[in-house]
Amino acid sequence: MRNPVLALVRLGPSAVYALAAMFLISMILLTNYPSSAWAWWLHMTILPVMREPISLLLAAPGVTFWGALTILTLAALLGTNLAIRPERYPKTGFIHAHVALIVTALAMIRVTNAQAGLSGFSLPQVLRGDWSMLQITDSLLGMALLGLVFLACLCSHIAMIRRICA
């Protein structure tokens, strides 16, 4: 029972990359079917969690939309292989999990700072009645991903320590 549970935990980073790829696919769906309620639901569900990481990825020089989709899909597939056979490439699994943790944490921090019409955050501007701050806990999908990726990073740390001590 222990190994399947740990395998599911180690799939957390792959879920982050797959969700980012799904966000890009939801953009394609909105472009082709702008009146589809399902396409809007998919896009708006993933938007708070993946808006910032996807914006950063697409802003990188030389990364196109289709290139980003390919990178994210390959990262999700690589992570699946790393979750099934963690003993083969522990350092790669370590890096894979920690990049996903950094991306998810960055996205969750940006969710707390998202505001309408303000260039910076200050208490007087919030008190004047802006629709203002979204809380981290408002994005349950983001919190679940952050927790799952954190556990995957913990598993990779434990594996690295065991490998060093053995």
Image (cartoon, helix red, strand yellow):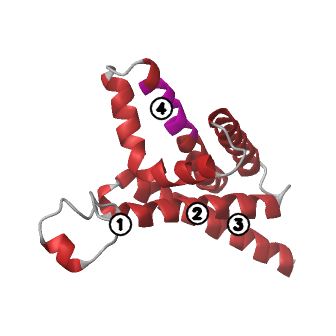
Inspect the image, locate mark 2, and give the three-letter code of the amino acid beneath it.
Leu
Q: How many marks?
A: 4
Left or right, residue 115 beside residue 9: left
The answer to which of marks 3 and 1 sits earlier in the sequence is 1
Left or right, residue 11 beside residue 122: right
Question: What SS does tag 2 mark?
Answer: helix
Where is mark 2, residue-wise? 101
The answer to which of marks 2 and 3 sits earlier in the sequence is 2
Q: Are marks 3 and 4 in contact (CB under 8 Å)?
A: no
Where is mark 1, residue-wise? 113
Where is mark 3, residue-wise? 156
Q: Are marks 3 and 1 in contact (CB under 8 Å)?
A: no
The answer to which of marks 1 and 2 sits earlier in the sequence is 2
Question: What SS does tag 4 mark?
Answer: helix
- 3 shown above or below 90: above
Alpha-carbon neighbours of circle 3 within 10 Å: few (<14), some, or many (≥20)? Answer: many
Q: Which residues are magenta?
A: 21-30
Q: Quadrant of residue 121?
A: bottom left
Magenta stretch containing residue 15, yes or no? no
